């Protein structure tokens, strides 16, 4: 029996419509089109050129007046500032003399990288925006400390403002110059940096820890002493650590170390650090710290045999222990935290080791 096949009619192709989208050149034809410059941080003339071009191409806009509000501007909403009732602020006069304001060449200012981090890629983008839109009515006066002995001025707040002024070839910028005795200069700088950044914006934990140490914070000094005694080194995201290379005892989890020290106190935290050192973690990960913190919550960590616990931890391949802890956490819909699951794994192996010794 012959099979009947229906003829397939060829569809009439739709007429081509010219695309209105701009066609980008291929990488092979024009590789520079795909390469964004790092920013004016390394190319000083970039910001000035961009600003000039932006100003030339910007459409002329009418002056901003109260008419722009379309009749919604209410003069009654203008009020003079004064104290607000109910705020718990000390009702004491602040009589310390305000800092001196000076006009300074921005190229003459310094910054101390011991507690201030280098600019990230995001900071560089923000620097470009500040530089391109540089204007005195948006200018934030930087705080600087005077090192009279070495005739230097150190910026503690406003480094991006200063760098933007440098790139825009501003000859002089106003700064607040704070003076301090030479013996207290570094401490006062760190204190200013901590106060400004702790209240107004988040900064990396490592920079905050270093600044608090320089300031002489008692808790941070006690923490640093215990870490140093046990060979534990907070490294932050710099040096080899930025490329994932660590030495034994190094960690980026300084914020968890600070929380453990605050929660467990000097003695228990010191016992936790001894276990970490004996376990030879490389690096010490946040999961390791959370696990040992959970163990300290469940057991009297000072009575734990350090060598036996370290041997129990080292007897498990770290990669597989972490995978198992994550699997337990996932199966519990995150009700069991990874650190707590890892703590149970360590304690189970520790008790197995103890029982084996007793049965010998």
Image (cartoon, grey):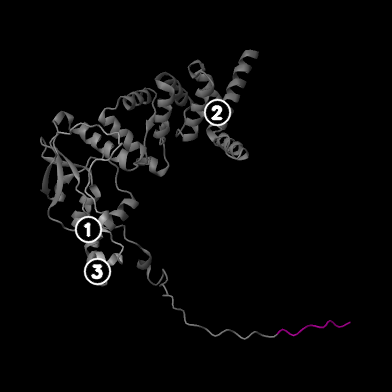
Mark 1 = which residue? 134
Q: Are marks 2 and 3 in contact (CB under 8 Å)?
A: no
Mark 2 = which residue? 343
Is label 2 in a helix, a strand or a loop? helix
Q: Residues within 10 Å of mark 1 (few under 14, many from 20)?
A: some
Q: Are marks 1 and 2 in contact (CB under 8 Å)?
A: no
C-alpha span from label 2 to label 3: 60 Å
Above or below residue 231? Residue 243 is below
Residue 325 x %, y %: 58, 35
Residue 231 x %, y %: 38, 26
Q: Residue at x 29, y 32 (%)?
A: 212
Q: Residue at x 47, y 30 (%)?
A: 289
Q: Is residue 308 visible?
A: yes
Write the start and end of the magenta stretch as one range. Answer: 1-8
C-alpha span from label 1 to label 2: 53 Å
Above or below residue 221? Residue 169 is below
Q: Is residue 360 visible?
A: no
3 or 1: tag closer to the N-terminus: 3
* Quarter residue 132 falls in: bottom left
The image's mark for residue 53 is: 3
**Quarter of the C terminus within the rendering:** top right
* Quarter residue 64 falls in: bottom left
* In front: label 1 or label 2: 1
Residue 284 x %, y %: 45, 33
């Amino acid at each position: 029996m012959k099979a009947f096949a229906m003829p397939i009619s060829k569809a009439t192709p739709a007429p081509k419509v010219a695309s209105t989208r701009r066609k980008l050149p291929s990488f092979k034809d024009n590789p520079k089109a795909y390469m964004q410059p790092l920013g004016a941080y390394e190319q000083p003339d970039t910001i000035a050129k961009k600003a000039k071009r932006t100003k030339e191409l910007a459409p002329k806009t009418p002056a901003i007046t109260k008419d722009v509000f379309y009749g919604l501007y209410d003069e009654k909403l203008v009020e003079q500032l004064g104290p607000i009732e109910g705020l718990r602020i000390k009702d004491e006069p602040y009589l310390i003399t305000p800092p001196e304001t000076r006009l300074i060449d921005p190229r003459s200012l310094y910054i101390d990288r011991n507690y201030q981090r280098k600019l990230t890629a995001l900071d560089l983008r923000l620097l470009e925006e500040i530089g391109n839109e540089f204007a005195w009515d948006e200018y934030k006066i930087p705080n600087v400390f005077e090192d009279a002995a070495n005739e230097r001025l150190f910026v503690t707040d406003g480094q991006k403002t200063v760098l933007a002024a440098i790139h825009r070839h501003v000859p002089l910028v106003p700064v607040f110059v704070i003076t301090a005795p030479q013996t207290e200069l570094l401490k006062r700088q760190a204190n200013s940096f901590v106060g400004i950044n702790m209240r107004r914006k988040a900064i990396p934990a490592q920079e905050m820890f270093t600044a608090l140490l320089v300031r002489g914070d008692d808790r941070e000094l006690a923490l640093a002493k215990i870490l140093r005694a046990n060979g534990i080194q907070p490294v932050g995201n710099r040096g080899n650590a930025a490329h994932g290379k660590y030495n034994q005892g190094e960690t980026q989890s300084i914020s968890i170390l600070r929380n453990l020290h605050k929660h467990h106190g000097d003695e228990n935290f010191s016992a936790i650090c001894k276990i970490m050192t004996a376990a030879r973690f490389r690096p010490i990960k946040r999961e390791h710290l959370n696990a040992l913190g959970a163990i300290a919550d469940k057991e009297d960590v000072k009575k734990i045999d350090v060598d036996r616990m370290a041997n129990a931890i080292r007897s498990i391949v770290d990669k597989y222990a972490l995978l198992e802890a994550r699997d337990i956490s996932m199966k519990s819909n995150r009700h069991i935290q990874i650190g707590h699951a890892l703590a149970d794994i360590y304690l189970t192996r520790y008790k197995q080791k103890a029982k084996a010794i007793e049965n010998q």
